[in-house]
Image (cartoon, rainbow, N blue to C red):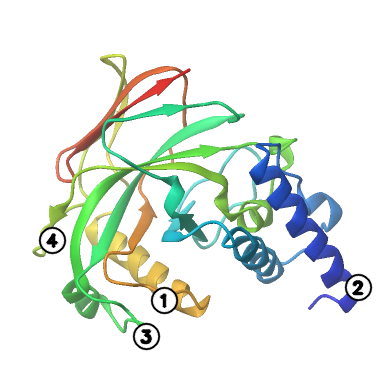
Amino acid sequence: MVSCIEQQKLSVYEDQLVYAFELDKQMPLVSEEYPNLSEEEAYRIQKGYVNKLLAHENIGGYKASFIDTKVHNMDKVGNPIFSVIFESDIQPHNSELSLYGIHKPVLETYLGFTFNQSIQNKVNDIDELKSLIDSYRLIGDITDLKFHNLNKTKTVDFIATNAVSSFILVGDTTKYTGQDFHNSLVQINYNNNQLYELRPKRDTQKALEDLLWLINTTIDHGYPIEKGTLLSIGDKAHLTPVRHGSYEMLTETAGMLSFKIIQ
């Protein structure tokens, strides 16, 4: 636990994050000022930061990042990182986006899920979870790695800054009827040329376990999950640098989405 004086300092750090977010500035590293900061404390910073942004933002969903990856010299993450998606971040298929104010944009592949009812309590198991899923879709998550020193980032920095998403691009929905949706080749094209293709390391069962974790963690953090709320789980660890041009993301089971980066 942090002392009252330290809690006041953490509140000042929340204000610094809001300032950086609103003016598109680089994010400070909380791990530099508080080297022994715990993940629990980092989530308290995230909560305060998110609550301050909710004065003029709305919640659009929640996501689990970094399920099995390292980012540069970041500590190995034992659990996914929970973060809030703002409604203003969500962009539809075929969007045209500007990189103005974005420092180090990278693209990751996610899967997004919506549910046939609101979820008030924790979900007990995978069978119950399956009965609640309405549909799923391909997600392109453009994250701005705008830390002033990316090589020194730690897990707590990503938690405190709410996983620094800039755009959540959503593809068309596919109705869920119990099918295998995750064992799907992912192909990324840039200006009609293939950048790479990868197959997920995790199968559908593991993806459902990740989704179950995200739902129950969202409940633990005290956030509502309404009918239609987007919950997104990380799919591939591959970070694709984003630049001006046209992108296509293709899968075998979750459809596709495209977007264009403009000046």
Q: Would you say the residues marked 4 and 2 are in contact, meaning their CB atoms lie under 8 Å apart?
A: no
Q: Which numbered dot is residue 216?
A: 1
Measured along the vertical axis of the image, is residue 26 above or below residue 244? below
| The quarter of the displayed image where residue 228 is located | bottom left
As rendered, which of 148 and 194 lies closer to the eye?
A: 148
Helix, strand or loop at label 2? It is: helix
Q: Is residue 199 left or right of residue 233?
A: left
Distance (Cα) linking label 3 and label 4: 22 Å
Classify 10 Å Cα crowding around label 3: few (below 14), some (14-19), many (20 and above): few
| The quarter of the displayed image where residue 151 is located | top right
Q: Is residue 109 left or right of residue 228?
A: right
Numbered disc in front, either 4 or 2:
2
Q: Would you say the residues marked 2 and 1 are in contact, meaning their CB atoms lie under 8 Å apart?
A: no
Tell me which label, 4 or 2, sits earlier in the chain. Answer: 2
Question: Which residue appears at 20% of the width and 36% of the height?
Answer: 256
Q: Amino acid at mark 1?
A: Asn
Distance (Cα) linking label 2 and label 3: 35 Å
Residue that mark 3 sits on: 121
Residue that mark 4 sits on: 176
Helix, strand or loop at label 1? It is: helix
Helix, strand or loop at label 3? It is: loop
Question: Which residue appears at 47% of the width and 60% of the height?
Answer: 58
Q: Position of residue 72 (x, y in %)?
A: 61, 37
Residue that mark 2 sits on: 5
Distance (Cα) linking label 2 and label 1: 32 Å
